Image (cartoon, rainbow, N blue to C red):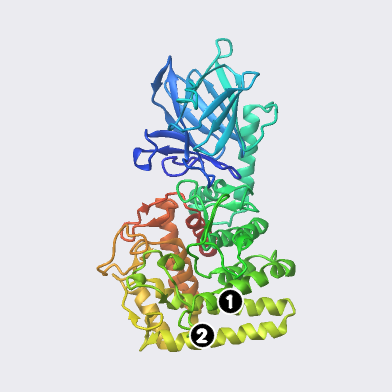
Amino acid sequence: MNFDIKQVPFSCKGSYLAFSLMSEIFGAGKKGLYLRTVHGDAAEREIFLFELEDKGISVPFDIYATPWVLHLESAHGYVDICFARPELLRIRGAGIGLRMTSSKESMFNNAIFSGKNRWSLNLFNNRIQFMLTPLKGRLNVEAPWDGVKCDYITIEMYPDNDEGYFECAIEEYRGSWQECNYNDKFEDCVERVKKDFEDFLSKMPEAHDRYQQARELAAYINWSCIVEPHGLLKRPAMFMSKNWMTNVWSWDHCFNAIALSYKYPELAWHQYMVMFDLQDENGALPDSVNDSLAVWNFCKPPVHGWTLKKMMENTDFIDEYKLKEIYEPLCNWTDWWFRFRDDDNDGIPQYNHGNDSGWDNSTIFVKRPPIESPDLSALLVIQMEVLSDVARILGKSKESNEWKSRAIDLLERFLAHFIEGDRLVARCSGTHEVVESQSLLPYISIILGKKLPENVLNRLISELKEDGSFITPYGFATENIKSPYYESDGYWRGPIWAPSTMLLIDGLKASGEEDYAKEVSRRFVDMASKSGFAENYDALTGEGLRDRAYTWTSSVFLILAHEIFA
């Protein structure tokens, strides 16, 4: 398979390095092919600009990307790049030279000759160190020292006169580099990566033949976005992207876990648990995390009970041992909402910011938060029902009954609090003033299915089916397209998103609308197959928007394509 590196980075499972084709708008300084880092402590992402040169002059080249090799082709020759290991690049070229230039000046950048023709590169702004080892060909390093730092670092590799090609190894290290040999043939490195990707692909949910090309790209995005345990990350973690969204967010990871749960349950469990590794003493989960930084300013909605239920339906891997591992953390996460997000003590938890809902700029939050939105209570009802089931499996019958009772109580409060006539409304915490909005967010409450009163459920379904409102040829817009707040690229004020799509589809199924759920799934899957796995999509054109290689989108595609078309 081939993919477009303008949208999808070239990387490999486990690596914190990636290649991207950058433009000036992303701050790279000069457009071109860059080696980048996704470590969370990097002050600057772009490490080296890669250029091909002939007799010292830069020449144009085409880029062909597969999961196992990045091929740079010019009229004069070629360069191939492979991740021999997550931290090790092997680069080979023939008929042409390669120039690597540090992307920006740094106050501490340094290049040191380390013997045996090796160079140690200390790139402070990137918070990274490399050992550069030439294996074949001629190496030239320019790194003039000004008494404090290197003014710039330029590395050039050329084929030698005898064999006509060059080859080098670039290895990332953190503290200490130990001498090693790079004896594997380049072809063997490529074959090893190819086998690893194909093994991962075989563990992805099956789909109809018409979606096989998209399935392979979705699998590549997920595979390549996994990073090894490091720093704050105690287990393999799937970033949302190796473009710009280089973190794990505490509801995004749930959709990735579900996609993996069918045939790769051990990795799925790592994705599910990765945020619980950082849970604080009060039960809160961080908003996001990477290997160096956890953000606690916000949180994300409690989709974790719903997620656990979906995963348990897909695999028997989640045995009593796993349930014991998650039970107390999930209890504490549930209780946190009632202890720390219910300022008016009415038993209805609140969002303190749009970011807490995951729908950052939803028009539900046009009025000043805190906001009591029905989707939050609906998710907590589901979560408490799941906790009741888990407690029962673990032999905790008293706790099982308590969670069941709490779920019933919250559902009763939900019905009394959020229903006006036959419609669901959000309210301001404290005053309980109705928030007038045309956001799709309250409709997520359809996950309660037939627990909702018949007239309310019928209205929800009717409005979700109404042409020219939320539904488009591609799926559900996150803001009614007739709304004055609707924007084609308005983030949560219009575009179609994968998580909202999946939650609504699940709610439609729970409401007896299997055929309509299947139709919406088909629209989303067709759109993603055509437009790629973007962060979100223009609701009226289906065009991909923002980050164009986003894992919860590829994961939801894999889930829906499997469930409907397998």
Q: CA distance from mark 2 to mark 1?
A: 16 Å
All told, the count of numbered labels is 2
Q: Which residue has dot 2 on it?
A: 411
| Amino acid carrying mark 2 in the image | Leu
x, y (%) of residue 27?
38, 40
Q: Residue at x 73, y 76 (%)?
A: 394
Q: Residue at x 36, y 74 (%)?
A: 465
Which residue is outermost to the front? 147
Left or right: 413, with 317 as reference point: left
x, y (%) of residue 548?
42, 49
Q: Which residue has dot 1 on it?
A: 335
Up the image or down, 232 lies above or below 521; here it is: above
Up the image or down, 170 lies above or below 528; here it is: above
- The C terminus, quarter of image: bottom right
Observer-nearest of 231 and 7: 231
Q: Residue at x 62, y 68 (%)?
A: 281
x, y (%) of residue 254?
55, 63
